[in-house]
Amino acid sequence: MIGTESSILIATVGNPYGGDDALGPCVAKRLLAHPIEGCEVIAFGDDLSTLIDHLPELDVLIIVDAAVDPTFVSLGRLFDMRARKVLKRLSFPHTPLSSHGLSLEQVIALAIELELLPRVARIVGLVTDGKHRIGRPTPTVQYAVPSIIGRIKKQVKRYRTLNNSVNSA
C-alpha cells in the first residue's frame, strides 16, 4: 500500500499442548502482551482455513510455526513462502479442528495460485526433528520465543525502511 500505513499480519500456528508445536501460541502470547507497533497478531491454532480471508489487505505476512525436518534442525530461520522447494522440504504438522481445515502448505499454495500472497511473505520458526509433539511447550520452544520475536522485529523494520524509501522517492 504505497502512500498509506502498511498492513502487517503476524499469524501464529500451533497447538499450545503440542510440545515443539507450541511455538506459535507462545509467540502469540508474548506479542499480544508486548505488541509490535502497527502489527496485528492472530493466533490461528491448528486451523488455517480463515487465513486466506486476511490476505487481500496485507502488505506483509509473517507466519510463525514449528516445522519438522529430521535432517535440518534450525532456529529462527526465515523462509520465503514463494520458494516452493522450501514448502516441499519442510513438513508443517497440523491437526485441523474440522475436516475443512487446511494445512500451512495448502493455504500458501492456494494463496499463490489465487495471487493473494503479499509481496513480503515469510515463515519464521523452529525446525525440529518432530520427536516432541505432546505436552507443554518444550524448553527448546521457550528458548526460541525471544529469538523468533527478534527475527520478526527485524523483518518488520526492514520492510518499513524499504517502504519508507519507496514512498519518499
Image (tube, rainbow, N blue to C red):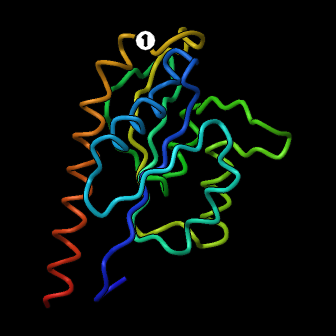
Residue 163: give x, y in percent of width and height.
23, 76
Label 1 is placed on what type of residue?
A: Thr
Quarter of the figure with the N terminus: bottom left
Q: Residue at x 29, y 18 (%)?
A: 143
Height in image: 49 above or below 34? below
Residue 74: quarter of image: top left
Residue 31: give x, y in percent of width and height.
34, 42
Height in image: 164 above or below 110? below
Is 105 on the left-hand or right-hand side of 89?
right
Quarter of the figure with the C terminus: bottom left
Residue lying farthest to the front in this orientation: 33
Q: Residue at x 40, y 35 (%)?
A: 29
For the residue carrying disc 1, how many other residues have a C-alpha within 10 Å: few (<14), some (14-19), or many (20+)?
Answer: some
Q: Residue at x 60, y 64 (%)?
A: 112
Q: Residue at x 48, y 49 (%)?
A: 11
Q: Observer-nearest residue: 154 or 53?
A: 53
Is 9 on the left-hand or right-hand side of 4?
right
Residue 160: give x, y in percent of width and height.
21, 68
Is 80 on the left-hand or right-hand side of 77?
right
Tell me the SS state at disc 1. Answer: loop
Q: Which residue is mark 1?
A: 138
Q: Observer-nearest residue: 15 or 103?
A: 15
Residue 24: give x, y in percent of width and height.
47, 34
